[in-house]
Amino acid sequence: IIITIFIVLITIYISNAYNIVVKTGGSSAVREALQLVVEDYNKVVDDKFTYESVGSGTGVERIILDAYSVAYADLILDGTHFALQPDLSQFPLTALAITVIYNLPGVRLALSGQQVHDIFAGKIKKWNELNPSYPNQNITVCVREDSSGSTAIFWDYINDAADTNEIPGPAKLPAWPGQVTRGKSSVLSDIVLNTPYSISYLSFSSAETKNIPVASIINKSGKEMIPSQESLLAAMESFVTKFSENFTAHIYNSDAENAYPITDYSYVVLRGETTRCDDAIKIYDYLKFLIESPHFSNVHLGELPNSVKTKIYDYLQNEWKCYGGYSVYQLIKEKETGMIVGISVGAAVLGVTLLCCCGFLTILFLHFYIRRLKRIQAKKKADNQSSLMGPKGKVAMVFTDIAGFTQMFDMFPEAAKKASSLHDALIRQLIIDYDGYEVKTEGDAFMIAFQDIFNAALFCLDLQTELMATPFPAQLYSLPKFKTEFTNDSQVVFHGMRVRVGLTLGRVERITNKNNPKRSDYIGPSVNLAARISDFAYGGQTLIDEKTMQAIKQAMMQHPDSESLLSRMIMKPYATYHVKGIAKPQLTYSLLPNKLENRLKLFNPEMNQRGKGSFVPPTLELAMEAGGGSQGGDNSYIQNELESIDTTPKSNRSSTRTISPNPLISSNSFSSRIAPFNAPLQKSKSTLSMDSKQLDAESDDESL
């Protein structure tokens, strides 16, 4: 009985051992189809297949590093890739169409390849240069800011279609001439939709999902074409005999009469003899399912013609080899004919015979092994519980808060719930990305701890940019704290949810969280300061104190890529505040991504009097006026406080002690802004200008 039970257990173990997790990932342009394929395939097999939308370049990098078993890429591998992994191979998966999207109300746009090239090369600058009946307006050109396979297809086409190549490469990230607006794939369509007279490029599946106008492209036969299954199939069939020895081909700008011209292949990338044969057999079955899947045509991608599918099966059956140089297809045929099964049965019989002889010793071994395994598991469980505690010692504390949160829920409660969920998911993903620790959350506010000030600063920078790329419900963009705002040169300053952030660095006391004894909470002056200065910030602004600013600079300078990192951010003096619970006035700095520097012009500390503390006016005379009543005209207290925040060496200080105004405010406008406050305090409230009152009323709905 014991031997029978043991054989059953061994059989179950062997069965589970051959159920593997196969990781795949890469191209985001075919994301919708691949997600559906993987979901369907996991329903019919015991193994688990996964797909990650990380982009073509990252997908290829990860299969080279053996992090993926299958990758998807909208690019052709080159010598650099093969030098890193000689057994890489690729074959076509689907045809990908890149469309030209535009915002030109009332116009059905049709463009030649030369015209598309000249627009993106900056040679055609106004719409009426294309057609006198079009508006006399500048064309706003929008492009991807990151390396992209879709960009490479678009760049290859316009340079092939034009008489001369006037847009320098590389293809995945060209040096676009002239003034262009840049954004990630997820936000490009929103920029075009919200920017009149703009133009960009996007995969056809994404353009259809966003319901954005698509221009017809004139092909080599002079026909105006838009992507369709027929036009993509025509492009693929015209290049069936033109594959390279690596099974690749460019199919853009086809000679076929009915072909859509901005088309190219998206590829599957595999490893060969560095793949375990057991895994390769399972991957082969998945690839057959993938090639025959109808999901590509269902999401506006081109299904491969049968002639190309035949070539793919021929490659997989005759050329693809796994570890040891074995043909994957031959191993599958042997398995189907029972050879491998026969060997397995013979081994099982031999194993049963040996087990009958050694049954007692085996059971005794299992008894002690299971006891040891339980001890290891108990230790791992204890280690995991200890990891629930947060950082300690010198800790960077971050507080976040959504601007206009109450108004959002009052006006659009259902949309506000979805927006709040997107906000929470983004913050928690960034916490994971930058090794942060979620201390607690209350309503729309987060309290987060970081052991590394470097990671805390990058968290704050990425939060402000990622919020602009997050697709919140459309009706929320009508709210003042959600609307899209542009500079005079059409650069996006605000788009979507605005979050105020406070960041400080200091020694804190780690205590047990009263709501969850397994988690940490924090107390101390640094914690209080972070919470207070986050209240002083505008939505879309991160405030830090002076010590934190110095710590960030020091951390950045020690980083090997310090110049690049420093160029990504802006740290500029903002305002000085008396903070409740802290005796010394605190000089604060704005911390923002470099490309959002124009936000600084919209932040005015005088008009944002919220939070537990008070704004210190930026001249000594004003400070004395504000404190005169209770101090009896003695300015020694103010003088001492000013000295404590003056960073100028004493030898270089002039005899007249003043604090310089905010550097973002010019001297002329500064004197006019400060004039009302030089009057007696009671009178100043009634003599504020209308603009100042209006700004104060609009500074934050929650402060009212």
Image (cartoon, grey):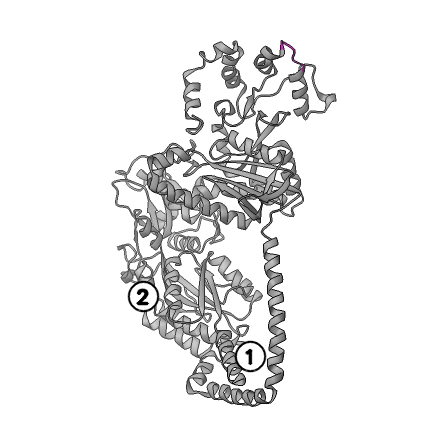
Q: Which mark is residue 324?
A: 1
User: Where residue 632 appears, x then y in whole percent?
Assistant: 62, 9
Q: Are marks 2 and 1 in contact (CB under 8 Å)?
A: no
Task: Note whether residue 512 is visible.
Answer: yes
Q: Quadrant of residue 263?
A: bottom left
Between residue 285 and residue 360, name the one nearer to us. 360
Q: Residue furthest front?
A: 1
Residue 273: x percent and y percent? 54, 74
Secondary structure found at label 1: helix
Image height check: is 629 above or below 301? above
Q: Residue at x 65, y 13 (%)?
A: 635
Which residue has dot 2 on it?
294
Quadrant housing residue 555: top right
Q: Tell me where the magenta segment starts and ends, as one range.
A: 632-636
In the visual, does 221 lie left or right of 427?
left
The quadrant in which residue 119 appears is top left
Marks 2/1: CA distance?
35 Å
Q: Residues within 10 Å of mark 1 (few under 14, many from 20)?
A: few
Residue 96 rendering spot, x and y as whole percentages = 37, 59
Element on which disc 2 rests: loop
Mark 2: few/some/many CA within 10 Å (<14, 14-19, 20+): some
Kind of residue indicated by mark 2: Pro
194, above or below 209, in the image: above
Q: Is residue 121 visible?
A: no
Query: Residue 204: where, in percent of width, then height?
Result: 34, 54
Q: Earlier in the sequence, mark 2 or mark 1?
A: 2
Q: Nearer the viewer, residue 407 or 499?
A: 407
In this orientation, which residue lies closer to the viewer: 53 or 208?
A: 53
| Residue 157, above or below 361 | above
Which residue is nearer to you in this view: 247 or 702? 702
